[in-house]
């Protein structure tokens, strides 16, 4: 019974997300939204040091980061709703991250944002989002601004998948099999960071 209730709440939260924000299809077609590549040794070392120093957490094998930008307009429609309605998004997202962490023991999940005060309420009110006050993470991986933020999944072998305009943090939904399929595709969009 409890499992069905949690599934129902997750489904309702997902439907609310879909209803309340701009679609990423307006910004990138499926071919250009994601790219893969390899992190340089120096980039990977700096990334791990930054995350460890900023969060005081021990990193797991796989690192997932969602990065939100100042001056985004992704959630402007949601900002017009009641505060309690907006807070349901904040708590729903936190619960989703906890479910991912419970199900995937070798994954570290982080949510960062660029410094500034021009943020949608669901970003501003989420106290679990870490402010990248030095903009070191921004300069390292997230310089290419996108509406709705971007996400990266970095594997222990330094391969990565980058999703631009990841409004719903779709990177959290990728299974091991999907990750390998994406990484194994020969792509002209492969990059070294």
Image (cartoon, helix red, strand yellow):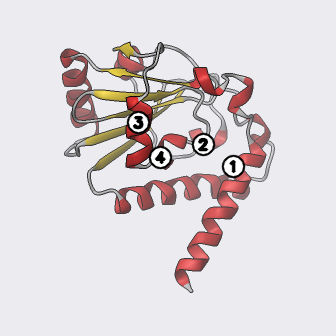
**Residue 72 x, y percent position in the rendering:** 65, 25
Label 1 crowd (10 A; few <14 / some 14-19 / many >=20)? some
Residue 111 shows in this picture: no
Q: How far, Cα to Cα, is label 1 from label 3?
A: 19 Å
Q: Which one is in front, 159 or 114?
A: 159
Residue 168, which numbered label?
2
Identify residue for label 3. 65
- Image: 86 above or below 79: below
Q: Is residue 53 visible?
A: yes
Quadrant of the rendered image containing residue 32: top right
Cα distance between the residues tagged 4 and 1: 15 Å
The quadrant of the rendering that contains the C terminus is top left
Residue 4 place in picture, x, y as percent: 59, 78
| Residue lying farthest to the bottom in this orientation | 1
| Residue occupied by mark 4 | 172
Asked if residue 73 lies left or right of residue 178, the reply is right
Residue that numbered label 1 is attached to: 17
N-terminal of the two: label 3 or label 4? Answer: 3
Q: In terms of secondary structure, where does tag 4 sit?
A: helix
Q: Residue at the spot x=68%, y=31% of the render?
A: 24
Estimate the spatial distance between the alpha carbons at disc 2 and disc 1, rounded to whole Å: 7 Å
């Amino acid at each position: 019974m409890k499992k069905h209730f949690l599934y129902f709440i997750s489904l309702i939260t997902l439907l609310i997300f879909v209803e309340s924000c701009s679609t990423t299809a307006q910004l990138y077609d499926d071919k250009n939204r994601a790219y893969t590549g390899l992190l340089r040794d120096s980039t990977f070392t700096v990334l791990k040091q930054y995350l460890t120093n900023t969060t005081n957490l021990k990193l797991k094998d796989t690192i997932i980061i969602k990065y939100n930008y100042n001056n985004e307009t992704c959630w402007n429609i949601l900002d017009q709703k009641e505060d309690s309605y907006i807070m349901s998004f904040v708590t729903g997202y936190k619960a989703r991250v906890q479910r991912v962490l419970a199900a995937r023991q070798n994954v570290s999940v982080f949510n960062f944002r660029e410094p500034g005060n021009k943020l949608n309420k669901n970003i501003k009110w989420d106290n679990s989002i870490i402010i990248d006050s030095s903009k070191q993470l921004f300069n390292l991986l997230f310089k290419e601004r996108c509406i709705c933020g971007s996400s990266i999944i970095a594997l222990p072998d330094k391969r990565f998948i980058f999703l631009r305009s990841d409004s719903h943090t779709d990177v959290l939904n990728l299974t091991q099999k999907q990750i390998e399929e994406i990484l194994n595709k020969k792509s002209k969009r492969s990059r070294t960071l």
